[in-house]
Amino acid sequence: MEATLTFLGTGTSMGVPTLGCGCAVCTSAMDGTRPHNRRTRASVRLDYNGRTVLIDTGQDFHFQAIREKVTHVDAVLYTHGHADHVLGMDDLRPLSFANPIPLYADDETASVIERIFEYTFRTQDRYMTSARVEMHRISTEPGTTVKLFGAAFQRIPVQHGSQVITGWRFGRAAYLTDLSSLPEESFPLLEDLDILIVDALRRAPHPSHSNLENSIALVERIKPRRAFFTHISHDLDHDAINAELPPHILMSHDGMCLDFEIAAAKTTEGTE
Ligand SMILES: [Zn+2]
Ligand SMILES: [Zn+2]
Ligand SMILES: [Zn+2]
């Protein structure tokens, strides 16, 4: 089944340009001389089978949805509960009134979303025009798969600082944002990929994100056909880094689209 992945955002948690920063990358993003350096908060949109599925809804979701003409959302899969991945959940409201939108998150992430948007999830005295969303807690046991609209989304454990968060594999593509390292058990789940999308924050090491050198090494070990870096800070200039990367690795940019094969869900029941 053919699918299209669109990068809604490719920036780190502070966004690029970073507020108060006058560096060359931020300046070029601000004045538009290097539009690919303008990076909103990281998330992706998947379109297949007439459906739209999002991975994460950061605080830039409203702007991104207008830019990419997102007119309906059928489900959202979450990676973890940091602000830059969940704060846009409330902007699902107008898209949810006709049909409730299912959200899939591990227990920790679900709890964060339910705490932040308490008025949405309360059963009594609920704010009338809250988002009509249904939280589905996913298991963090090995082999967790969510089946959505004929495709299977497999949970990939990802180390993000001291936390283990959720990466997603769907057919021949995988999205691993906010990654400092990959647990050994996750490597066999990432074989035969056409597309690997992975965190590459900056050049210098960081306690909870992968740096450029580490991300290149990760790509070389996983051996996808093509790899795309995301969750990028203002340390990396889009064109300059692309020029030094091997040909099968590219910097992603906001609005970039990739076509790939999304696996059909098997008939056996998975964990939801
Ligand atoms: Zn993040
Ligand atoms: Zn800057
Ligand atoms: Zn994070």
Image (spheres, rainbow, N blue to C red):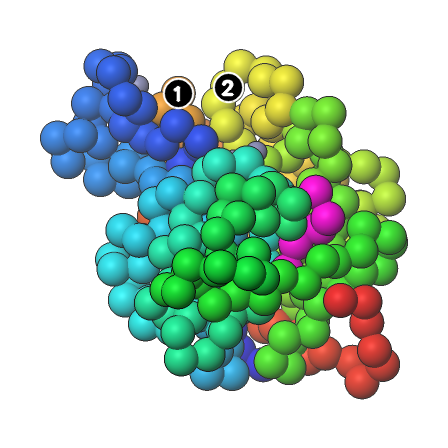
SS majority, magenta: strand
- Tell me whether circle 2 and circle 1 mark residues in contact (CB < 8 Å): yes
Q: Is residue 10 left or right of residue 16?
A: right
Number of numbered discs on residues: 2
Name the residue beneath numbered marker 1: 235
Residue located 33% across and 38% down the image: 39
Residue located 59% across and 27% down the image: 209
Is-magenta flag for residue 250? Answer: no
Amino acid carrying label 2: it is Arg
What mark, if any, has residue 203 been given in the picture? 2
What element does badge 1 sit on?
loop
Q: State the image coordinates of residue 119 (x, y, percent, origin top left).
A: 48, 52
> Which quadrant of the figure shows ligand 2?
top left
Residue located 74% across and 58% down the image: 138
Specify the quadrant that holds the C terminus: bottom right
| Residue 240, visible in the rendered structure | no
Q: Dot 1: few (<14), some (14–19), or many (≥20) neighbours within 10 Å?
A: some
Most extreme residue toward the front, as rendered? Answer: 125
Amino acid carrying label 1: it is Asp
Residue located 80% across and 46% down the image: 186
Between residues 136 and 74, which one lies in front from this camera angle?
A: 136
Specify the quadrant that holds the N terminus: bottom right
Q: State the image coordinates of residue 128 (x, y, percent, origin top left).
A: 39, 65
Q: Which residues are magenta?
A: 103-108
Vertical placement of residue 156 versus 221, above or below: below
Between residues 225 and 205, which one lies in front from this camera angle?
A: 205
What element does badge 2 sit on?
loop
| Residue 156, visible in the rendered structure | yes
Determine the image quadrant of residue 148: bottom right
Between residues 250 and 77, which one lies in front from this camera angle?
A: 77
Between residues 134 and 262, which one lies in front from this camera angle?
A: 134
